[in-house]
Image (tube, rainbow, N blue to C red):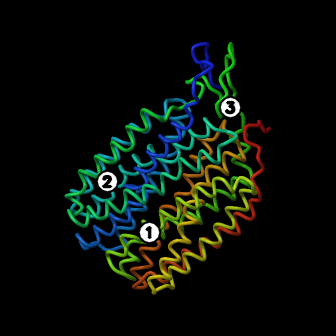
């Protein structure tokens, strides 16, 4: 329940600031994804070349990062349910920037794990749980569009920030680039997060989607499925397990992509691998935000997971540069939309009331895949002497996700209605 007062009522000519909130979320995710989600592949590649550390050990560092981020997401969900979400972004920006600064100074693998523990905390606080929670509060009818635009920042970070970070690290070494990367992380999360990412529309005198609060209104009830009911549902189980498999294969494939591209092509060409992936992710996500709400979202994610399987198998078996990049584009189309659909599926099926806790919980369980995927593919690379086996295993995980999503059924649009 959100309390309002006469001071919160919007004036007749006040402009709904919802799109400014979406813009703030977009910028926060652009930075945290560019230097975090996608940036980890750059750091793995740099540490492999500069320190000579094996891929399996470095990939385990990525696993540590995502495990800590998933656990922290549970705390972040509880925090922003009661407090201003901007405080979470502020803390995440400070911790994330400090972690990047320390990353340039490490001299042993165990230090990488310590730094990545801290970086995972910062990434979670200034990441998807915080941004999507705020956006779902501001938009109900236009939620798909709003989350689509805000989450596009994930891919824009891969387009604008990650290639620049790779170029800078290649030119200056990781140690030389780290202070500047830390500065970008701090400014890019804290500034838009603090000034644009307002926690709740009621604080500005609006209801979700832009309706002004009626004069004399005293409260607005957030409706939705009770937490315990949602947790026991077949749909929540299927979405959670499906995303363990789908994101495990996806994140594993992304985190190893730069190294794979360097082995199959050249260092210069590899710099464009993440760029091509992210550009296609942006295009596909924006199209998906308009098209997918017309269909059953549970079936949409099933089909996307199937095409992700094809893309990963193609990457495993492709040695021709043009064919290789064609499968990168297909992979990018699935990456953008599968990730966007996770918060939409939870919000559409279970509503807004328990969204932070439910999304935080499914993100926590997804850590099994998100954290295990990069390590598994790195370990298979070292054992098999290449990435063919690793990416075929990832394709198999994505195919398993297809069957699990299908088992869960469609996401009835029960959002914003109380269920017993």
Determine which residue is flagged by label 3.
222
The residue beneath circle 1 is 375
What SS does tag 2 mark?
A: helix
3D distance between C-alphas at marks 1 and 3: 40 Å
Q: How packed is label 2: few (under 14 Cα within 10 Å), some, or many (20 or more)? A: many
Vertical placement of 400 versus 409: above or below?
Answer: below
Q: Using the image as rendered, state which of residue 328 and residue 97 is in the foreground.
A: 328
- Viewer-nearest of labels 1 and 3? 3
* Position in image of residue 280 (x %, y %): 52, 65
**Relative horizontal placement of residue 135, taking residue 46 as reference (left or right):** right
Q: Quadrant of the N terminus?
A: top right
Q: Residue at x 66, y 57 (%)?
A: 239
Q: Residues within 10 Å of mark 1 (few under 14, many from 20)?
A: many
- Asked which secondary structure carries label 1, the reply is helix
Residue at x-position 48% and y-position 46%: 26
Q: Relative to 346, is 59 on the left or the right?
A: left
Above or below, 91 against 406 in this view is: above
Q: Horizontal and vertical percent for residue 61? A: 37, 62
Per the model, the C-alpha gap separating discs 2 and 3 is: 38 Å
Tell me the residue that label 2 is attached to: 115
């Amino acid at each position: 329940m959100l309390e309002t007062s006469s001071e919160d009522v919007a004036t007749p000519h006040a402009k709904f600031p919802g799109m400014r909130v979406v813009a703030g979320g977009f910028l926060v995710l652009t930075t945290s994804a560019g230097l975090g989600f996608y940036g980890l592949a750059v750091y793995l590649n740099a540490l492999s070349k500069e320190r000579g550390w094996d891929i399996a050990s470095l990939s385990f560092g990525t696993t540590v990062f995502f495990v800590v981020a998933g656990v922290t997401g549970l705390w972040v969900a509880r925090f922003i349910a009661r407090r201003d979400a901007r405080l979470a972004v502020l803390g995440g920006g400070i911790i994330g920037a400090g972690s990047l600064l320390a990353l340039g100074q490490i001299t042993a693998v165990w230090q990488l794990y310590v730094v990545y523990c801290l970086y995972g905390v910062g990434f979670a606080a200034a990441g998807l749980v915080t941004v999507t929670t705020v956006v779902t509060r501001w938009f109900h009818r236009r939620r798909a569009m709003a989350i689509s635009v805000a989450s596009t920042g994930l891919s824009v970070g891969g387009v604008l920030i990650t290639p620049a970070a790779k170029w800078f690290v290649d030119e200056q070494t990781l140690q030389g680039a780290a202070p500047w990367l830390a500065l970008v992380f701090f400014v890019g999360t804290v500034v838009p997060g603090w000034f644009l990412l307002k926690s709740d529309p009621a604080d500005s005198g609006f209801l979700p989607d832009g309706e002004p609060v009626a004069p004399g209104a005293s409260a607005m009830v957030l409706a939705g499925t009770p937490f315990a009911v949602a947790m026991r549902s077949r749909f929540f189980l299927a979405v959670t397990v499906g995303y363990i498999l789908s994101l495990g294969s996806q994140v594993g494939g992304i985190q190893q992509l730069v190294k794979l591209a360097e082995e199959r092509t050249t260092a210069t060409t590899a710099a464009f691998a993440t760029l091509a992936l992210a550009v296609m992710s942006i295009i596909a996500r924006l199209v998906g935000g308009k098209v997918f709400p017309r269909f059953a979202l549970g079936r949409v994610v099933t089909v996307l997971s199937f095409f992700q399987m094809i893309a990963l198998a193609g990457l495993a078996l492709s040695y021709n540069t043009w064919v290789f990049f064609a499968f990168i584009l297909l992979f990018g189309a699935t990456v953008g939309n599968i990730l966007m659909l996770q918060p939409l599926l939870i919000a559409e099926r279970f509503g807004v009331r328990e969204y932070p806790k439910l999304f935080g919980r499914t993100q926590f369980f997804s850590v099994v895949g998100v954290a295990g995927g990069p390590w598994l593919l790195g370990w298979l690379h070292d054992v098999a002497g290449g990435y063919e086996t690793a990416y075929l295993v990832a394709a198999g995980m994505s195919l398993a996700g297809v069957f699990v999503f299908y088992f869960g059924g469609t996401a009835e649009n029960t959002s914003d209605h109380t269920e017993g």
